[in-house]
Image (spheres, rainbow, N blue to C red):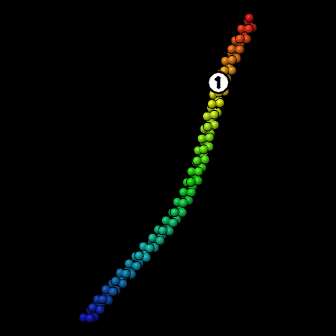
């Protein structure tokens, strides 16, 4: 009877040892996979950092271009106003010349 009990205990121990080894093997595989995942996350983090720096650089360039465009629009407005002023002065000059011509023609005939 004692040997039957011992052999049962041995089988239980052996079964538990096998289960423990299998569990350790699974945990080792999970840890290896997690390690691979963390390495990939580290690479992605570096890549995201590089992309973020590029985006910030582009944003600064866009801001500079926006400022230049705003300044150019201001210059365009000034040039347009000056063009309109020149056009009005030209019309006034034409009107004054026409009046002078009429006056001179009136004095010549008199």
The vertical placement of 87 against 102, above or below, is below
Find the residue positioned furthest to the left: 1
In the picture, measured across the screen, residue 12 lies left or right of residue 92, that is: left
Quadrant where the C terminus is found in the figure = top right
Q: Quadrant of residue 4?
A: bottom left
Q: Which residue ends up furthest to the top in the rendered image?
A: 110
| Residue at (43% x, 76% y) in the render | 28
Image location (x, y in percent) of residue 40? 49, 66
Where 35 sits versus 104, above or below? below
Q: Position of residue 58 (x, y in %)?
A: 57, 51
Label 1 Cα crowd, 10 Å radius (few <14 / some 14-19 / many 20+): few
Task: In the displayed orientation, state which residue is furthest to the right.
Answer: 108
Q: Which of the 4 image quadrants contains residue 74?
A: top right
Tell me where residue 17 appears, x and y as whole percent.
36, 84
The answer to which of 26 and 94 lies nearer the viewer is 94
Residue depicted at 30% across the width and 89% down the height? 9
Residue 101: image x %, image y %? 71, 13
Q: How many marks?
A: 1
16 with respect to 1 (left or right) = right
Which residue is depicted at the point 37% across and 81% down? 20
User: Quick one: SS at disc 1?
Assistant: helix
- Say which quadrant the N terminus sits in: bottom left
Which residue in the structure is indicated by mark 1? 88
| Picture residue at 51% right of the left edge, 63% below the top | 44
The answer to whether 2 is drawn above or below residue 96 in the figure is below
């Amino acid at each position: 009877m004692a040997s039957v009990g011992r052999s049962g205990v041995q089988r239980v121990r052996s079964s538990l040892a096998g289960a423990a080894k299998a569990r350790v093997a699974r945990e080792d595989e999970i840890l290896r996979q997690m390690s691979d995942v963390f390495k990939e996350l580290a690479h992605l983090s570096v890549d995201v950092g590089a992309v973020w720096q590029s985006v910030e650089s582009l944003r600064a360039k866009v801001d500079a271009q926006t400022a230049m465009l705003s300044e150019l629009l201001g210059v365009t407005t000034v040039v347009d106003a000056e063009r309109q002023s020149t056009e009005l002065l030209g019309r006034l000059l034409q009107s004054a010349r026409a009046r002078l011509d009429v006056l001179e023609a009136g004095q010549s005939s008199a």
